[in-house]
Image (spheres, helix red, strand yellow):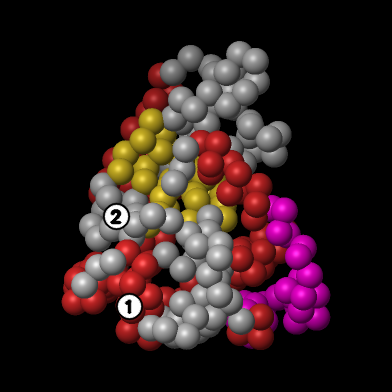
């Protein structure tokens, strides 16, 4: 089974959803036959590399919400994170542009270190108050995760792997994905939001069972020929947009970041 995930590093729901998926896979009987592919998604392309206002004030101003409401949302998210072993220190989060970090993760995948680098960068933003839009911070985090410092510096100082980021985002738009995290299971069923672990386990088992009962499908490779798309092809080879969606509201979009 293939799982494609669109997420943004600076989305707290993406951290929570990633953890829930990991815990669900620990309970899934066929986890060794599951491949997970992570795709880039930027909630705010125009964000400064490193913001100067507090993240709470930034969100309150952007969406026109009372500050106390935003604080309450983040406290709820921190409690949900703690319940699954995560430490969401929302009061120390540094607003950051995630483009360079997404490029770094694509580079890490190319050298077989995506999991390690993703873990390090996400933890740094989520828990340590790291400004992940700062190239020097990213270099330190990449080195912590085992990437070569000189090679990483060259990547960060260029726009290399930028095309991969933009391709992921184009695929998300083509699929109608407008909020993260979005998990596309077996290229046909989409789960949007940081659902509970039990929901992920149920979805995994349902999709696995569907594989054993459904007729052999026609080719379902990526709409752009790289296997990255999360939906099937129609008879003429174009994206048919046929995947189903489930959404509980616990996701972030460019327009709104909703509390679960």
Give the Cα separation between the discs numbered 1 and 2.
18 Å
- Above or below, comparing residue 224 to residue 201 in the picture: above
Of 60 and 153, nearer the camera is 60
Q: Which mark sits nearer the N-terminus, 1 or 2?
A: 1
Along the horizontal axis of the image, is 193 left or right of 70? right
Mark 2 burial class by Cα count in 10 Å: few <14, some 14-19, many 20+:
many
- Above or below, comparing residue 130 to residue 48 in the picture: below
Q: Is residue 7 visible?
A: yes
**What label sits on residue 56 in the rendered view?**
1
Element under disc 1: helix
Along the horizontal axis of the image, is 144 left or right of 119? right
Element under disc 2: loop
Along the horizontal axis of the image, is 198 left or right of 208? left
- Asked where in the image residue 135 lies, by quadrant, the reply is bottom right
Say if mark 1 contacts mark 2, CB within 8 Å: no
Seen at 41% across and 38% down, the residue is 190
Of 10 and 95, nearer the camera is 95
Across and down, in percent, residue 240 comes to 53, 23
**153 in magenta:** yes
Across and down, in percent, residue 131 comes to 53, 82
Seen at 34% across and 57% down, the residue is 256
Dominant SS type (magenta): helix
Mark 1 burial class by Cα count in 10 Å: few <14, some 14-19, many 20+:
many
Please give the residue where the numbered disc 2 appears in the rendered image: 250
Magenta stretch bounds: 138-164
**168 in magenta:** no
Across and down, in percent, residue 148 comes to 75, 78
Of 57 and 257, nearer the camera is 57
Of 149 and 224, nearer the camera is 224
């Amino acid at each position: 089974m293939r799982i494609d995930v669109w997420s943004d590093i600076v989305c707290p729901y993406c951290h929570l959803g990633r953890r829930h998926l990991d815990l669900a896979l620990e309970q899934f009987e066929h986890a060794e036959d599951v491949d997970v592919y992570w795709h880039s998604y930027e909630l705010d392309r125009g964000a400064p590399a490193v913001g100067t206002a507090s993240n709470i004030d930034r969100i309150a101003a952007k969406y026109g919400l009372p500050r106390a409401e935003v604080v309450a949302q983040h406290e709820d998210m921190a409690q949900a994170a703690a319940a699954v072993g995560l430490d969401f220190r929302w009061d120390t989060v540094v607003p950051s542009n995630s483009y360079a970090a997404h490029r770094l993760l694509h580079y890490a995948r190319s050298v077989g270190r995506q999991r390690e680098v993703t873990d390090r960068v996400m933890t740094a933003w989520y828990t340590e108050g790291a400004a992940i839009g700062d190239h020097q911070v990213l270099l330190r985090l990449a080195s912590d995760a085992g990437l070569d410092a000189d090679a990483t510096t060259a990547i960060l100082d260029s726009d290399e792997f930028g095309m991969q980021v933009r391709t992921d985002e184009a695929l998300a738009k083509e699929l109608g994905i407008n909020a993260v995290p979005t998990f596309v299971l077996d290229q046909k069923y989409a789960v949007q939001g940081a659902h509970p672990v039990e929901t992920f386990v149920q979805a995994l088992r349902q999709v696995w069972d569907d594989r054993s009962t459904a007729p052999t499908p026609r080719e379902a490779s990526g709409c752009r020929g790289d296997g990255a798309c999360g939906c099937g092809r129609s008879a003429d080879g174009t994206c048919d947009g046929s995947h189903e969606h489930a959404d509980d509201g616990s996701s972030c979009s460019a327009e709104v970041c909703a509390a679960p």
